[in-house]
Amino acid sequence: MHTLYRHSLLLFLLLSTAAVVRAQTQAEWIKAAETSFEYGDYYSAAYYYEEALDYDSTDHELRFRMGESHLLYRNYETALEAFDQLEAKGVAANFPRLPYLQAKAQQPLGHYDEAIANFNEFLAAPGNGSAQEVADARRQISNSEWAKEEYAAYEEELANGTQADIFPINYTNVNTKFDDFAPQFEADQFYFSSLRFKMEADSVKPARKVARILQRKADGGELTTNKLLPPEINQRNRTAAHTAFNADASMVYFTYCEYRQDTFSLRCDLYAAPVDAEGKWGTPQMLPINDGMANNTEPSVGVHPDGRTYLYFASDRSGGKGKHDLYRAEILEEGFGSVEALDELNTPFEEVTPFYYAPKRELYFSTDGRNTLGGMDVYRSTMAFNGEAWFEPVHLGLPTNSSYNDVYYVRYEDHDFGYFASNRHAADAIFWDEDEDVCCNDIYMVEIEKLCYEVTTWHAQTQEELHATTVTFYEELPGGERIELAQEMDPAGNFYTFEVEKGRNYHVTGYKRGFKSDEASVDISQWFRDLAEKPEKIGKCIKSELFLAPPKIILEVTTFNKRDSTELPGCTVYLFSRQKDSDPLVEIGRDTKEDSNFYSYEIYAEHYYQIIGTKPEHSSDSASVDTRGLFVENDTVIKRQLYLEPFLPDPCDIQPTVFFHNDRPRKGNPHTITSADYMDTYNTYVNTHKPNYYRIWAKAPGENTTVRTARLDAYFGEVDKGAEDLRAFAEMLHGYLQKGGALKVNLQGFASPLSNGPYNDKLSARRCISVINYLWNYEGGVLRQYMSDGVILINNKAGEEAQGRGIRRHAVPSSYKGMPVVAYQSDAAPAQSGKALVFDIKPGGEVPVNPAAGLVDTGSDSVYSPVAGAARYVEVKVELCDEEQTDETDY
């Protein structure tokens, strides 16, 4: 049985015990007090300390111990008086735990500000208490702050007339000066337990008390005389309490408790007894789910939505989270399922007196492990439909809860009241008077204020009734979670009604296919405030209207540069529409945005749309959207992207002509390959040899020096232009290839007639390969993959024979070291003859690092093949440019 009730029992036993020992010495009173305190008999300890103080009222240590004993017995006012006397006498410093104990007495009396101040004072001096007391002080500060807010809201409701009163149930006939608890209704019968009966032939004097189960019948709204259940149930010298019936009342579950030998400590087990058609209980049987080393008590039967039935109970068995925890076990046809701890609800403190309310899938229980007003408070938690999870527990609030202990809450679908037990200080509490401020429970009832809630559904655009709407009704928890309570749909109407209760928040949603959902929340407290002020305008029901509208479909179009996927402003976007495939497309929108690439349109269901984007000097792009058959419930955004490709100059528009120094690259070399990069030869040409030409020509006889210099400037201008054209060609080629193009590049090399034909063929080949090397190395190799994959097809043609057929001579009337200085330039005619070197850049496997390194001289002046072991080269016949791309001229 719960500790609270053991204390209630001890109070009445020890009041008479105290009278027997009045003639003791102070030392004997102190010893008796210490023994009682150690045993957990705090009422006796407090009494004995008071007797000891009669010998010496200045003994502050005795007063402190007396106050602590009263506190642990929940005699808060007397405890606080003792602590305050110590503080008034200026000896508080001798008792470091005093602020903590003062706060523990002030909090359940509702003195929250004083309690918070004392808890903080206690925490400000480290080492004054145990780690457990420090943690508890922090928790109780939070509790007190929360309780202040709860009381302030409650007092406001009392002031404005929106809060109902609470009162005991037939207290003259049910409640006594003893402990009355565990109310339970079954049909027209009311059951409760009362701790008022003496044990027979008890070895402890005076005799200890036991609880019995009593029964009353409701007759005309009044309860008849109390009646004890027969001795087969209320057995001799056993406490019987806590009744719970199954769904058809064919089985009752309850608790038997027995004292442990000659102590006041009780241990409890769960029992069951069959009930016949006339309500008579059969022989009790102990349940197999009991733990023989722990208390097993306070049963409640719960029928889940899936039809399974569970027995809920409290136990302090090992393995739990705290002291008493909540458990359940499924009731099977033969026996019970395994015991499950409700760890989502349990805390490291006390969870007791569970009651399952099937109509709302709710479990009510009392706890001091969550925010409370001071003692044990009643909470409720809703079980999820799957029967496994539990929603966050909700405090029942005032006036059901108080700063004292509120336990054993029950409710019934056909009752307008909830019932519970409490040891609160109330003017009409049977047990309480000003001289005895703590003891026992009385049974109370509190009205459950129920209201009707009417919901109507409407078409948001036409304001007409919207039939066949699915309306879902929820309870909304303080943390924002929603629990579905009901769902209805009227195919021929728009009116729905639900029952709501004060102290809860609700939410309702309306849904219909092809419409956006609507929702509303219900503030019950505000409705009551309005009712108190204007009852004639409010009516008897809370009302909400739901307006459902067809959803919007938004088309968002964005335009991008196809080349690099960057945003492309300045486009014109056209929107066309039709409903049937046989209908012509009709332009319904045109929009140009110079500074944005974003376009938005509202479109409609059951249409086909085409979007076209254009921009000058760009290719167009198009996309489509088909909403025919598209079903949306909420506003929907459909996105489309258009990629417009800018028109770029064709690389074939550039025909680079590049120049080489005499017999370069690889002067005098008999081979056809080179690792030289054309730009290396160009830089050497203009940086090293060019100054020599200007110096020599300045001394040469003949033409005027100015004329010769101008001619030389013009020539090297062509040399520089050739290099720049080659760079521009490579850049344009890269962009062209990035867009997916392919290209055939014809390279034709030439040499002067200063050497013989075979040598010139090899020199021309080396010059072509140096250009290939430049393309291979361009910008770190960005063209290599294209060259390797055959996207660039390169034809390499060696140039003319030594006789210089097709070569035009530019005479320069001067000599350099006995040799004439002559410029030769090719006519670059396609009909020129010469030995051609043709190879294709598309390997079937690995590619040499440098394409020139992949070619070797086979001994022939005109035929070259891949390096032995290299991948086979395959010709790719792709040709976009008909012109020969590069002419090379030697100077």
Image (cartoon, grey):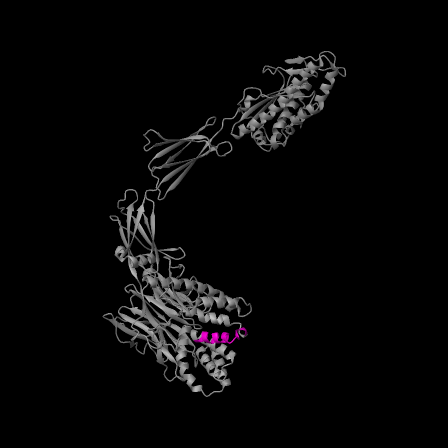
The x, y position of residue 206, in whole percent, is 40, 84
Q: Does the magenta stretch include residue 83?
A: yes
* Residue sitting nearer the eye, 90 or 444: 90
Image location (x, y in percent) of residue 568: 48, 32
As drawn, 30 above or below 887:
below
Residue that lies at the very extreme toward the left in this rendered image: 220
Q: What stretch is highlighted in magenta?
A: 78-93
**Dominant secondary structure of the magenta stretch?**
helix
- Quarter of the view holding residue 714: top right
Q: Is residue 858 visible?
A: no
For the N terminus, the image quarter is bottom left
Does the stretch in magenta take in 762?
no
The residue positioned 69% from the left and 12% from the top of the image is: 811
Q: From the viewer's perspective, is residue 558 above or below residue 247?
A: above
The part of the image, by quadrant, that contains residue 729 is: top right
- Looking at this view, name the residue that lies furthest to the top: 702
Question: Along the horizontal axis of the image, is 269 left or right of 170?
Answer: right
Decide: is 399 above or below 865.
below
Q: Nearer the viewer, residue 574 or 398?
A: 398
The quarter of the image holding the C terminus is top right
Of residue 595 and residue 39, the one placed in the foreground of this image is 595
Residue farthest toward the right in the current orientation of the protein: 817
Percent across and percent down for residue 649 are 53, 24
349 with respect to 300 (left or right): right
User: Does residue 346 sit above or below 781 in this rendering?
Assistant: below
